[in-house]
């Protein structure tokens, strides 16, 4: 009889566990759909609340921005009403050409009385128009469709020129570029040797120096000493003196021979640049 009682007890325990699991599943299934309904009810309550701004409505300016009645800023566009071009820097002051001379209406303040007028003529040469009032010279330039530019403010009377400033500036920039191309930058070439250099090697170094000097470059000659060779520093001075004599017609020595550690240095430059 005991085995039957233990088996019946285990069955009751199993049935109880299954019942509890079933109850938990049912309760979870029943409570899950209630969450969206609560959220929807909460959203419905909040959506019914309206907010009002105390700031009065401001009309949108025509053109898409820039202020009331002011067209928008467009880089490279036409000038805005009220001054300033479309290409100027909107975050800072307008750019000023530092090389631009006083011209046109600014001359009425710098030379209010009379000026000496020169009229530009690239084909036949400049024409002297004589002395006239500044206002008359300005009107003459406007009639010709040109600019009135100050040439010499310190002269008596000041000298002005009637010319196309755009073409005048272009010609100046073109001349500057040509001058930069023609101007050669001087370089410093180095020639190293030992105080006991052989005759053949000395001739090779002298050919190098000759080529550098003929090209317009400076030559830095360095005589090197290693270890105990520095005891013969006088031989290095003799070698540099020999180089100076050999190049007396082609170059001149800059300053004196100087010593830097275990080296003697002498600088030579072409005679034509003196």
Image: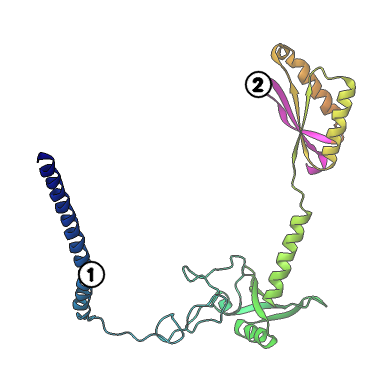
Residue 154 belongs to magenta span = no
Do we see residue 161 in this rendering? no
Instruction: Assign the N terminus to one quadrant of the image.
Output: top left
Q: Residues within 10 Å of mark 2 (few under 14, many from 20)?
A: few
> Mark number for residue 261?
2
The residue closer to the viewer here, 248 or 181, is 181
The tag on residue 33 is 1
**Quarter containing the C terminus:** top right
Instruction: Please tell me which residue is depicted at 82% across the width and 35% down the height of the picture.
Output: 251
Callout 1: SS: loop
Name the foreground residue: 270 vs 210: 210
At 81% from the left and 21% from the top, the residue drawn is 239
Q: Position of residue 158 (x, y in %)?
A: 63, 73
Q: Residues within 10 Å of mark 1 (few under 14, many from 20)?
A: few
Residue 87: % across, % down: 55, 74
Instruction: Say what secondary structure mark 2 lies in.
Output: loop
Residue 20: % across, % down: 16, 55
Residue 25, quarter of the rendered image? bottom left
Relative to 222, residue 66 above or below: below
| Tag 2 near tag 1, CB within 8 Å | no
**Colour mode?**
rainbow
Range covered by the magenta-colored residues: 251-274
Q: Position of residue 49 (x, y in %)?
A: 19, 79
- Camera-nearest residue between 108 and 61: 61
Residue 48 visible in the picture: yes
Q: Residue at x 86, y 24 (%)?
A: 202
Tag in front: 2 or 1: 1
Point out the tag, 2 or 1, that comes first from the N-terminus: 1
Q: Is residue 268 left or right of residue 23?
A: right
Along the horizontal axis of the image, is 207 left or right of 84? Answer: right
């Amino acid at each position: 009889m005991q085995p039957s009682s233990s088996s019946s007890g285990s069955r009751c325990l199993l049935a109880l566990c299954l019942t509890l699991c079933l109850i938990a599943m049912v309760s979870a299934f029943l409570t899950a759909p209630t969450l969206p309904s609560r959220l929807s009810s909460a959203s419905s309550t909040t959506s019914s609340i309206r907010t009002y701004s105390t700031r009065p409505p401001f009309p949108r300016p025509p053109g898409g921005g820039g202020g009331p009645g002011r067209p928008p800023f467009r880089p490279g566009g036409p000038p805005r009403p009220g001054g300033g071009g479309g290409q100027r820097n909107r975050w800072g002051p307008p750019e000023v050409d530092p090389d631009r001379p006083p011209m046109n209406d600014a001359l009425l303040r710098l030379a209010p009385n009379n000026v000496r007028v020169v009229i530009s003529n690239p084909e036949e040469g400049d024409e002297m128009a004589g002395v006239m009032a500044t206002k008359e010279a300005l009107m003459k330039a406007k009639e010709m469709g040109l600019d009135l530019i100050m040439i010499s403010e310190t002269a008596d009377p000041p000298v002005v020129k009637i010319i196309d400033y755009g073409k005048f500036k272009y010609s100046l920039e073109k001349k500057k570029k040509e001058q930069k191309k023609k101007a050669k930058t001087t370089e410093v070439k180095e020639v190293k040797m030992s105080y006991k250099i052989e005759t053949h090697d000395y001739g090779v170094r002298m050919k190098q120096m000759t080529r550098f000097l003929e090209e317009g470059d400076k030559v830095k000659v360095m005589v090197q000493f290693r270890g105990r060779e520095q005891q013969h520093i006088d031989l290095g001075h003799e070698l540099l003196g020999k180089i100076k004599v050999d190049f007396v017609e082609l170059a001149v020595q800059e300053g004196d021979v100087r010593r830097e550690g275990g080296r003697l240095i002498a600088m030579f430059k072409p005679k034509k640049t003196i």
